[in-house]
Amino acid sequence: MLSRHLSPHLETALADYPAVVLLGARQVGKTTLARKIGDGKEPHCIYLDLERPSDLQKLTDPEAYLSLHPDKLVILDEVQHMPELFPLLRSLIDEGRRAGIETGRFLLLGSASGELLRQSGESLAGRVAYLELSPLHWLEVDAEHQGALWVRGGFPASLLATSTTKSLAWRQNLITTYLERDLPSYGARLPAQTLRRLWTMLAHKQGGLLDVSQLAKGLVIDAKTVHRYIDMLCDLMLLRQLMPWYSNVGKRLVKSPKVYVRDSGLLHALLGLTTLDDVLAHPVMGNSWEGFAIETLLTACSKVTQHGYYRTSNGAEIDLVIDIPGDGLWAIEIKKSPNAKPRKGFYTACQDLQPTQRFLVHNGPDGEPYPVGDGVQAIGLGALAKLLQQKQ
């Protein structure tokens, strides 16, 4: 099994908190990671899948069942389907604390971040830690799979498929599952075909400014509806809205978020791109690499960092701005080629923000960074991700 970098952070959170919420998209590896943690605690661990009828039957009287196991780690998978559990978990946690059981009571897995954060936050405030498991990223895969990671994406079943055709078929089936099952279960009322069109339109606009009115016009629906479904895709951790970075520099700033399909493999499946040659020949290639790099770098960052993009109305732009406590502002220009140079607008934006570090990140080897002028260092994507991980 592939080693997940979140594993030690999850172990630490369970040692520090009575409840831990592990968020992540479907099929990203949450259950595998949780069961690995649970295997290390056998026989003091119980796993319940709330989408399995036999496990739901055990929770017909959840208080009676869970009270039988006060000294065990209880793993509840897809817990957002039973929101009525959260007040009970709070009561059991407080009861356990009085009995001297302070930490490691519940590990809650969920694939709808906003709903789960709301449900747990209302009942478990001060008793819960939150972690997000991303798809496999650059630092989690070996050199053999790094070459396929951008094209296939980081979902384990897609990345490790025995052929490119099987990988694409798996991703297309996952997209269909989201459209026909998951989105309707979270309140989607639009036909699956309309939702697919919206998702595909967003894929074509990868890395572009979000223009809801244009999307609504293309789908012949109202803008509020488009907003609602974009929020739903973000809630399911399938879409990212990269917000603009605001700074008091006396410039007119672009205020619309940039939108990305978070997993590059899903992006390519939505566009029908199977091989590396298909991706390289498609107009979305540059923005696809940009989104892939952003996801890699943000996954490597500590949760306490702030991030966004910076763009003025005059065209000065920084692809990714990261504010690292204790290290100041990092300005990052993203290019596919290791021979590329920063744009003039990047230097102008750096004069506005005065970042402490300036990087040109590329897809070349992860060697030592080297200067390319005016304080900018060129660096491979993996090497920069390692630097950010060291800042945690």
Image (spheres, grey):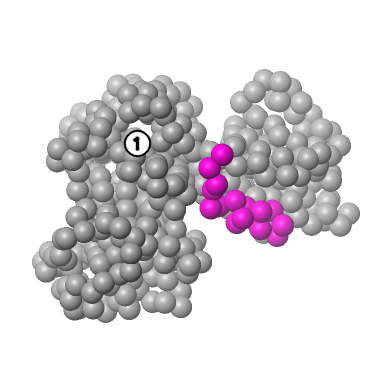
* Residue 106 versus residue 13 in the image, above or below: above
Which segment did they paint magenta?
1-16
Quarter of the view holding residue 314: bottom left
The answer to whether residue 36 is visible is: yes
Between 147 and 315, the residue placed more toward the observer is 147
The residue located at (20%, 33%) in the rendering is 278
Is residue 10 found inside the magenta-colored segment of the image? yes
Secondary structure at badge 1 equals helix
- Determine which residue is flagged by label 1: 152
For the N terminus, the image quarter is top right
Whether residue 219 sits left or right of residue 35 in the image: it is left
Residue 118 place in picture, x, y as percent = 55, 47
* Residue 373 versus residue 190 in the image, above or below: below
Quarter of the view holding residue 116: top right
* Residue 153 versus residue 349 in the image, above or below: above
Residue 387 place in picture, x, y as percent = 42, 67
The residue located at (64%, 29%) in the rendering is 50
The residue located at (76%, 26%) in the rendering is 58
Is residue 174 found inside the magenta-colored segment of the image? no
The residue located at (67%, 20%) in the rendering is 53
Q: Magenta-highlighted stretch: main secondary structure?
A: helix
Density class for disc 1 (Cα within 10 Å; few <14, some 14-19, many ≥20) is: many
